Image (cartoon, helix red, strand yellow):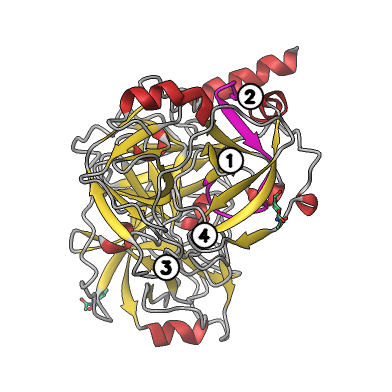
Amino acid sequence: MLRKIALLLAVTAIASGNPAAGQEWHWKSPMPKVEAKRPTPDSRIIGGVESVPHAWPHQAALFIDGVSICGGTLISTEWILTAAHCMDQAVTVDVVLGAHNINEAEPDQVVITSTQFVVHGNWDYNNLANDVALLKLSTPAELNENIVVAPLPPATYVVAEGTNVTAIGWGRTSDSTGGISYVLREVVVPVTSTETCNDAFSIVNDNQICTDGTGGKGTCFGDAGSPLNYDGYIIGVTSFNAAPECEAGYPDVFAKASKEAAGKPKSWKSLRPLIEPKGLRMPTSLAAAPGCNEAVPHSFPHQVALFIDDLYFCTGALISTESVLAPAHCIDGASYINVIMGAHNLAQAEPDQVVMTSINFFVHEEWSSFTLSNDIGLIRLPAPVAVNANIAPAQLPTTDPPVGTIVIGTMWGGSGTNGALHQANVSTISQADCNAIFGIVTDNQMCTESPACCGNSPGLANFNGELLGLGSFASSAGCEDGYPEGYTKITSYLDWIEANTPITP
Ligand SMILES: *[C@@H]1O[C@H](CO)[C@@H](O)[C@H](O)[C@H]1NC(C)=O
Ligand SMILES: *[C@@H]1O[C@H](CO)[C@@H](O)[C@H](O)[C@H]1NC(C)=O
């Protein structure tokens, strides 16, 4: 009993403000280290000074799952730019804005939680390419003189070699310091060439910027995700430096930041809610899960791809010539949606593809982003689409098959699938078994066993020529762990669909 109370208090403390305020430093600071090829240069001072408080009002501190710290940049009232390696495996991030000393609960600090992230679709942990991610704040930040949105430069913006730029962060101030810095610090460093940088690392390309670490000046643990600043712009995101030391004088590497890099369609992973499983695991393990195979092109002609605000990818289903069913979590709050119909391979401009942009869509009146209940919405196409062999409305079901039925999950986006639609046979599991894992599952949802990482979001569940389920959620533990996936059950919404669809499906 005592332990339970202690735990609750700890959780309450975290939920009520800056999770770092007043705490003994215990945050891990993820920052990948790359073995440098050349010998250590002769230098040993980490440069930099404490920043004037609030001189960098776009800087955010990210406390990840109560364990790790990274930096980030406020790039709009709702979005934080950070490093992908900070977000790998993350579930909940407390974003502290307006801070100078993160060990204090300063009155200017605002803490906003985020559980929605997009990691760059080409983020590669092996060579640390495209180390950028975006976090969506659960409520928009209120701007003031200490909380300011930073502009990103256009992709064509070039910062010449030798230019002095400013790295900032709460990272360690020396290799011998145990913890990171409580106060925000900054260091001015010159940009160095990709070639010079590759003398040390070999993996750097034109999507990255390097700074000269001579004199031991640069970034260290805890700085990851923080911005590289120049001329009022955010030009980079702190990514990695040399193993094992920060002070050794090797260059530091930043992912290049630009407007385009933060909003390119198709290169972003899908938006999908992730739920922390309660630790129970399905008896069906990954090894037993059936294979993931490329679908016969156009064998699911109702399946459509949705690119939302040129930022997210989701899957929807055509249900009439003018209406597309889409998960509410995908379209809630969106500005515009590009609907791609008749596609097999999304990485190609196939002649069969028909693209329409819709600004007319809505979500179920009782959609809850908390419980993910009623995760359904409708998109109206700007004009009826011509039905052909590759584009056809889905057959809607009248009943659900029994638990244990093998259904076909169809999805885009799994690693190694190269943009082609894939399918996997998966067994449906009971609502009770699924709820034992996720704790939010109701009769209006259906679950299947894990489709073995076949796609990066649950797509559609099909059975006997009918559309049974619209992909809703998956486990935050990742697809490798073999947890089931959740779908919005179509039979629960037949009346809603009929009432809201201009032409009866
Ligand atoms: C960069 O800053 C250093 C140190 O203050 C200075 O010596 C150097 O001239 C500056 N370089 C440029 C291009 O301004
Ligand atoms: C998937 O299930 C269908 C129908 O039950 C079956 O015909 C097909 O062979 C299965 N495919 C795989 C790859 O197991």
Q: Which residues are magenta?
A: 440-459
Q: Which residue is mark 2?
A: 439
Q: Which residue is mark 1?
A: 474
Mark 3 lies on residue? 347
Amino acid type of the residue tagged 2 in the rendering: Gly
Q: Earlier in the sequence, mark 2 or mark 1?
A: 2
Residue at x-position 45% and y-position 54%: 269
Nearer the camera: disc 3 or disc 1: 3
Q: Secondary structure at mark 4?
A: loop
Q: Residue at x 66, y 31 (%)?
A: 401
In the image shown, does 346 or 466 lie closer to the viewer? Answer: 466
Q: CA distance from mark 3 to mark 4?
A: 10 Å
Q: State the image coordinates of residue 67 (x, y, percent, origin top left).
A: 58, 41
How far apart, in angstroms, are the residues tagged by discs 1 and 4?
19 Å
Can residue 142 be seen by looking at this rendering? yes
Q: Is residue 192 above or below residue 491?
A: below
Give me the C-alpha separation between circle 3 and circle 1. 24 Å
